[in-house]
Amino acid sequence: MYQLIFHSNNSDIANQIEKDFEIKSIKHDGHFRFNLTSENKVNLQSLREKYHEDFNLVDQSFRFEDIGLMVSDMDSTMISIECIDEIADFANLKDQVSEITEQAMQGILDFNSSLKKRVALLKGLDLSVLNEVYIDRLKTNPGAELLINFLRNQNIKTALVSGGFTYFTDRLAKDTGIDFSRANVLEVENGHLSGKTSGRVINSSEKANFVKELCQDLNLNLSQTLTIGDGANDLDMMNLSGFSVAYHAKPVVIERANACICYGGLDKIIDFFTNKPFS
Ligand SMILES: [Mg+2]
């Protein structure tokens, strides 16, 4: 059995859906749910486009109460920027970095090579630039704090993973109360970037490995994980998790995730967990 979740309080739209599909709505805190029968054919894409709101289908046999870990991508998922682009902007290297990003997007360069090339461009940059990017440019996406606080109250562990840099993931994790983080380590020499990273490159498969490692450490099954991402690099970890959410994501990610949030904030993810009718 599936439930349609309408991630909004808009009762006019809920009433319209009741009429169109001949189904009853159930009001919850912050959203509506509809129990679907096998006769109900719901096209999520057309609902989303028609109402400019978030709609998702959830399999009622999936136990959200068993989720013990949330792992989220950082750039353009938990925060609104791509850190490396902002560093490049500060250092007047935006064009060079964009060119490499473009090559990676066209498939000319793989992630590891493109990271290496971009980090090499940052050689000699003063560490204070990273601080400035963090202070001036890095903002969490809407609803991030609500989501993190909700998960903490449910005793769900939280983790941040990024193909970017530990300078940002570690600091953001600390500032927001996220339990774990992993990213690439920028090598520093005398207060300046050396143009290299140290240790393993955190790419798509290393993001997935991070989820596996955390599950082992926390004694959880992969099915007890929730992952959130926006880019192709998040697909490996999203594929192996129990429930994956594409957040304002690229089409390929929306296609393959269990759910997507394209209009609302990160706090809409709380709706999946709050399955108690509103009275
Ligand atoms: Mg991202």
Image: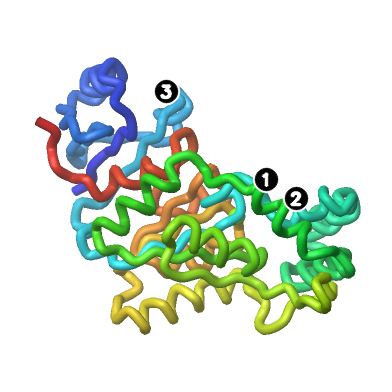
| Viewer-side label of 2, 1 | 1
**Mark earlier in primary sequence (2, 1):** 2
What label sits on residue 137 in the rendered view? 1
**Mark earlier in primary sequence (3, 2):** 3
| Viewer-side label of 3, 2 | 2
Give the crowd class for mark 1: few <14, some 14-19, many >=20 residues within 10 Å: some
Which residue type does callout 2 highlight? Glu
What label sits on residue 86 in the rendered view? 2
Disc 3 element: helix
Is 34 left or right of 133, judged from the image as shown?
left
Disc 2 element: helix
The Cα atoms of the two marked residues, 3 and 1, are separated by: 32 Å
| Viewer-side label of 3, 1 | 1
Q: Which residue is at a point 53% across and 46% down the rendered structure image? A: 140
What label sits on residue 51 in the rendered view? 3
Q: Which residue is at a point 19% across and 34% down the rendered structure image? A: 28
